[in-house]
Image (cartoon, grey):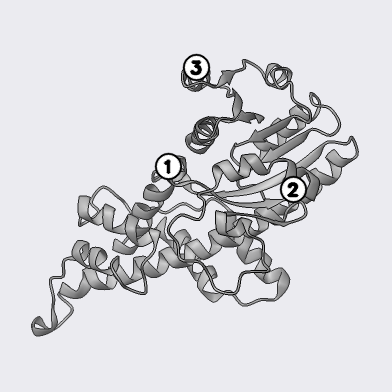
Amino acid sequence: MQIGIVGLGRMGGNIAKRLMRAGHDVAVYDIDANARAALGSEGARPAETLEALVASLTESPRAIWVMLPAGKITEGTIAHLSSCVDPGDILIDGGNSYYKDDIRRAAELQKTGIRYVDVGTSGGVWGLERGYCLMIGGEKAAVDHLDPIFAALAPGKGEIEETPNRGSLDPRAEQGYIHAGPAGAGHFVKMVHNGIEYGMMQAYAEGFNILESKNAEVLPPGERFELNVADIAEVWRRGSVVTSWLLDLSAIALAKDPKLEAFSGHVADSGEGRWTVEAAIEEAVPAEVLTAALFTRFRSRQEHNFAEKMLSAMRLGFGGHKEQN
């Protein structure tokens, strides 16, 4: 299947590579000529402009996946593409856009017959090899047309044990992708996913901070332990109820740098945590853990401890996010 990819950063480039590995015909565009050339050397068809990208897609309907930071650059790119494509073509936003922007964009594009699909994409820098968990919003016909793309990007069933009593439920979920609902639903589900991620990361960070601080001078000498935090992270990976990929990444970071001296503890937030808290407020749903985790990130920009360094280490591990001081 033909598809165009706009934005060849950490995730966009790897999405293009994974699709090519699955045999799809991938045309690519990025403002960086070197990024275009690099993908071209691996089998993609680079285009020097968005107009050229659209023209290179000869299958109908065209499908173009935009993988850019949320906000003005995505807004402008989708507007530009909408002036180049034909009715029936499909524009896909695979970044982390705000779901209310998706609802608005879909309604605007529908007036000219252009179809819009939003895809919450989880997998970070590891997605090329592990696959991407995809949460999709949009009209059924457009989503069904794109199924070969989603199936290629998703991780598949793998070795995860099957969940009982799923016989009447969507089998795509077991493959690592779902059609969550109409436009906006994909990014809404991904937004809440990221809010949960904040809370899970904060729980790990606080726990490791307690372990790291067990040798503090404020404690009576007989109650101090000098604990090997890297070994604790490793043993928790094996048979523990707190096992997760975030714990795997924590163990990797601690084995390499037990004191996390490479990190300052300045923890950024990319927006989804804020939007999740806003949604909880709109729905009058309590979200104490997620809200506290978000506010801890704000505090990390003023003072730092081992917990914040743990958060920075996990963010670098799953998304390649470097600290911004």
Residue 257 place in picture, x, y as percent: 21, 52
Q: How many marks?
A: 3
Circle 3 sits in a helix, a strand or a loop, which is it? helix
Residue visible at 60% across and 37% down in the picture: 67
Question: Mark 3 highlights which residue?
Answer: 37
Question: Mark 2 highlights which residue?
Answer: 102
For the view shown, which residue lies furthest in the right direction? 111
Quarter of the picture holding the C terminus: top left
323 or 298: nearer the viewer: 323
Circle 1 sits in a helix, a strand or a loop, which is it? helix
208 or 186: nearer the viewer: 186
Q: Which comes sooner in the sequence, label 1 or label 3? A: 3
215 or 318: nearer the viewer: 318
- The reply to whether residue 226 is visible in this rendering is yes
Taking 167 as reference, is 95 above or below it?
A: above
User: Which amino acid lies under the numbered mark 3 shown in the image of this protein?
Assistant: Ala
Circle 2 sits in a helix, a strand or a loop, which is it? helix
Label 2 Cα crowd, 10 Å radius (few <14 / some 14-19 / many 20+):
many
Mark nearer the viewer, 1 or 3: 1
97 or 8: nearer the viewer: 8
Residue 265 place in picture, x, y as percent: 34, 55
Question: Mark 1 highlights which residue?
Answer: 129
User: Which amino acid lies under the numbered mark 1 shown in the image of this protein?
Assistant: Glu
Residue visible at 76% across and 32% down in the picture: 79
Label 3 Cα crowd, 10 Å radius (few <14 / some 14-19 / many 20+):
some
Q: Is residue 288 left or right of residue 62?
A: left
* Distance CA(mark 1)–CA(mark 3): 22 Å
